[in-house]
Every structure is written in structure tokens, then in C-alpha cells.
Image (cartoon, rainbow, N blue to C red):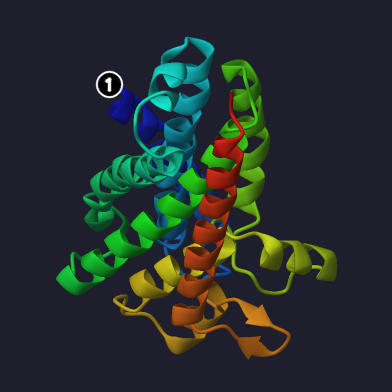
Amino acid sequence: MRVVIALIQPLLFLFVLGTGLQSVTRAATDGFSYRTFIFPGVLALAVLMPSFFSAGSIVFDREFGFLREMLVAPIRRSSIVIGKCLGGATVAGVQGVILLALAGLVGVPYDPLMMIALVCELLLLSFALVAFGVMIAARISQFQSFMAFVQIAVFPMLFLSGAMYPLVGLPRWLEVVTRVDPVTYAVDPIRRTVFSQLDISETTRRTLAPGVTWWDWRVPTLLELAIVAAIGLALLAVAVVRFQRIE
């Protein structure tokens, strides 16, 4: 039931918002389907919420006393944090894989190599997001407060990542903010992977998938993924340190 509910929001973005905006964007994209364009961003959304919910279980366990039992167990506290991050990333990644099954409905081919690459990218993104959530959850004692934080954090991270629009021609201040958003460096590789299998003109490809640039240099895909991995490991380290201080 939780998996089904978590998929409702991505499906609304993909088929309701995507279809509704198709008439507006058709002329600007030379007839290219807006649903196909936002599919990579919707994949990121599919792992975004489950990742934070998995991390939020720590707050729930603390509030109802179960966390105390884990903390007195004869294991390192760091193993609890690492297990939570890996387990949460697996759960969120599986939900992303379920959404991948709908690729054909939005004009994305079922290429095996593309699917494998997308699964790896989604798992990496979900790991970084769960680590971020665990780091925050280690300092929050009430589940309601954690959920309020999730509501504040999720949509800015999603909308600033270029999930719903190309990262080109933006005002300078917005361009800077999008480069600071870590989700940006996950959405762009996902979009590159999808667009590499689409039969579209090079002009449309440059317009809709311009990539992430630092000044005039386009950041390579491997560097983007390395940034996401580094952020995830750094957040994991901070989460471990904060977890050591929980009484």
C-alpha cells in the first residue's frame, strides 16, 4: 500500500501535468512530448519522497522508544546509520524501477543498457537523499517536525534541479541556485541517459538537454555522479557523528 501511494504523485506529474502542459510547450519543442522531457525528473521524484520517509523512521522509532533498544544493542551505532541508508536507498530505488516500467508510455524505449544505467543512477541519488534525511532525523525528536522539514525541502530541491524545465536561459540568480542544488547533478545524468536513446534532432537535444554548465564548461556525466556520491558519503559521515551523540 505504501508503494502504491508513493507512486501516485509521480504519476500525476507525468500524465496529468505533462499532458496538460503539452499544448503550451509543443511549439517551443518542435512537437517533442513534454511527458518524455519530464520523465527523468519524475524518476527523481519517485525516489525523493521514499528516501526521506525511510530516514524519517528514525524519528518515529525514537518517539516510540524503539530506537533506545537499538542504541543499547552490542553493535556500532555507525552500522545502524549505514544500514538505514542502504536499506532506504534500496526501497526508494525499487520504487524508481517500478516507474521505469512505464517508460514506453511516454516514448522512451526499453533499452537494457539504458535501464541498467538508470537503476544505478537512481540508487546513487536515493542513497544521498537518505543520508541527508538521516542526518536531519538525528537532530529532530518529533515526527511531525521532520515531516514539516520534508515538505519544505522536497519541492525546492526538485524544481531547482531542472526536472521540469531545461537549465538554459535562466536569470543569473536562478542559475546559481540550480547549480547549488545537489539533485541537479543527479537529474542531468538521468536525462542524458534517456535522451541518448531518443531519435531527435541535435537542435532539440541541445535545447532540452543542455546539461549542467560551470561558466561555459559542460560538466561531464561521471563528474556529476561523483559529486552526488561525494555528497552522499559526506552526509553519511555527518549523520554517523550526530548519531553518536543521541542519548
Q: Is residue 44 above or below residue 130?
A: below
Q: Who is closer to the viewer here, 159 or 135?
A: 135
| Quadrant, the N terminus | top left
Q: Is residue 207 above or below residue 2?
A: below
Q: Residue at x 56, y 61 (%)?
A: 231
Work out whether residue 58 can be spotted: yes
Q: Residue at x 61, y 37 (%)?
A: 136
| Quadrant, the C terminus | top right
Q: Residue at x 39, y 59 (%)?
A: 124
On the rendered structure, is 122 left or right of 159? left
Q: Who is closer to the viewer here, 182 or 210?
A: 182
Q: Residue at x 46, y 71 (%)?
A: 225
Which residue has dot 1 on it? 1
On the rendered structure, is 87 left or right of 152? left
Indicate the position of residue 158 as horizontal and vertical percent values. 58, 50
Q: Who is closer to the viewer here, 154 or 19?
A: 154
